[in-house]
Structure formats: structure tokens, C-alpha cells
Image: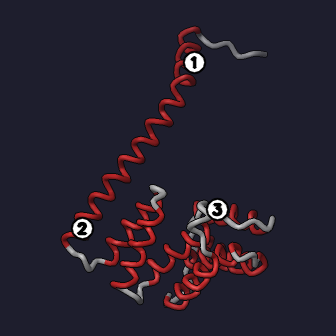
Amino acid sequence: MPIRLHPSLKAFSLALLLSLPLMVSAQEADDAARLDKALHHYTEAIKENPFSADAYLRRGVTYRNKKDYAAALADYDKAIAIDPVQPAAYNAKAWLLATCADDAVRNPPMAMELAQKTNALSPQPNMDYLDTLAAAHAALGNFPAAMETLKTALALAEKAGQKETVADMQKRMQSYQESKAWRQ
């Protein structure tokens, strides 16, 4: 039996449906504005403390999210220069070099080198760092190693109850099973 909607509900539903693309555009603009605001705040933090590796790292991630890959890489390099034993900046740079959708940015051999260094610097196994190492293996075409490494990362994520991370990693596992490197 067909569902009958009250005319006012039909009009509301149609208006909502027609406004959805505008709402998505507004959300994207809002996200872009938030990224610009974050960049401003990280830049101010760097002016206050030019030796803050964390501020450079976070600004680099924000640049990556804005798809300004050159600026992201420059900030990751600055964070590494300031704190060469902190694995997070190595990891962020490795992830970008392994998974970037821009072919000109991707550098799988360097991504592998950085991902290995990240994991060596980490005092204990880290699901995010292992995920990056798996992505570097996949970027180099070594899918068996990518899947094996990602299995370890998945186990850590499941143990930590990180449901969203587990779901993301499962998508990457599917990609590696299909012999496809992950692109972002």
C-alpha cells in the first residue's frame, strides 16, 4: 500500500530535498572556513613559539586537509627538524607520501622509509603508525605485507574499541586485497 503524505509534509520534503545541495555546499564552505581559521591560529601559535613541533605538525595536517600539499610537507619537515625523535610528524609525512591522490606528491620509497622510522621511534606498537606502514607497503605494490601489517593495526584498533578507525582500516584492507594502493 503506498504511503500518503499530508500536502504540507510533501512540500516540506520537497523543499528539504531541493535544498540538500545547497546545504552540502554550505557545509563545505563552513569546513573550509574552519580550516582557514585553524591555519590562522596555528600560524599565530608558531609566531608565539617558533620551536613548537606540535604547532607545525597540526598546521601541516590542516594544509593537507586543504590539499596544499607543498605547505603540508614543509610544515612536517619543520616539525621533524625541531623534534627529530617525535614519530607523529614522520607518520603524517609518510601517510601523505604514500596515499596522496596527487601523483606528483606521492613518493612510495620515501613513504616506506619514513613509516619504518615512525614505527622504530614508537615505544610500543601504534595502530596509526602501522596503518601508515601498511599504506606504504601497498604504495610500493607489496600487498601481502600491507595486509599483514594492517591486520596488526586492526587488532590494536579493535582492542582499543576504535570502531570508526576499524571501519576505515577495513576499507583499506579491501583495497589491498584487490591489489589497489590507498588514495586519499
> Is residue 174 toward the left or the right of residue 119 in the image?
right
Q: Please tell me in which quadrant of the rendered image residue 132 appears.
A: bottom right
Residue type at tag 3: Arg
Q: Quadrant of the N terminus?
A: top right
For the C terminus, the quadrant is: bottom right
From the viewer's perspective, is the residue at label 1 or at label 3 nearer?
3
Which of 167/33 is in front? 33
Given contact means CB atoms under 8 Å apart, are the residues at marks 2 and 3 in contact?
A: no
Name the outermost residue toward the front.
Answer: 104
First in sequence: mark 1 vs mark 3: 1
> Is tag 1's residue or tag 2's residue first in the polypeptide sequence?
1
What residue is at 33 percent from the left and 59 percent from the top?
A: 39
User: Where residue 145 is drawn, which disc sits there?
Assistant: none
Callout in the foreground (1, 2)? 2
Real-space Cα distance between discs 1 and 3?
Answer: 36 Å
Residue 7, given in percent of the width and then of the height, sits at: 58, 8
Residue type at mark 1?
Answer: Leu
Q: How far from the left and from the top, in percent, is residue 85?
A: 41, 89
**Residue beneath label 2, please?**
45
**Disc 3: which residue:** 183
- Across and down, in percent, residue 109 comes to 63, 81
- Give the spatial CA distance, label 1 vs label 2: 46 Å
Q: Using the image, determine if residue 16 lies above or below residue 166.
A: above
**Residue 14, label in figure:** 1
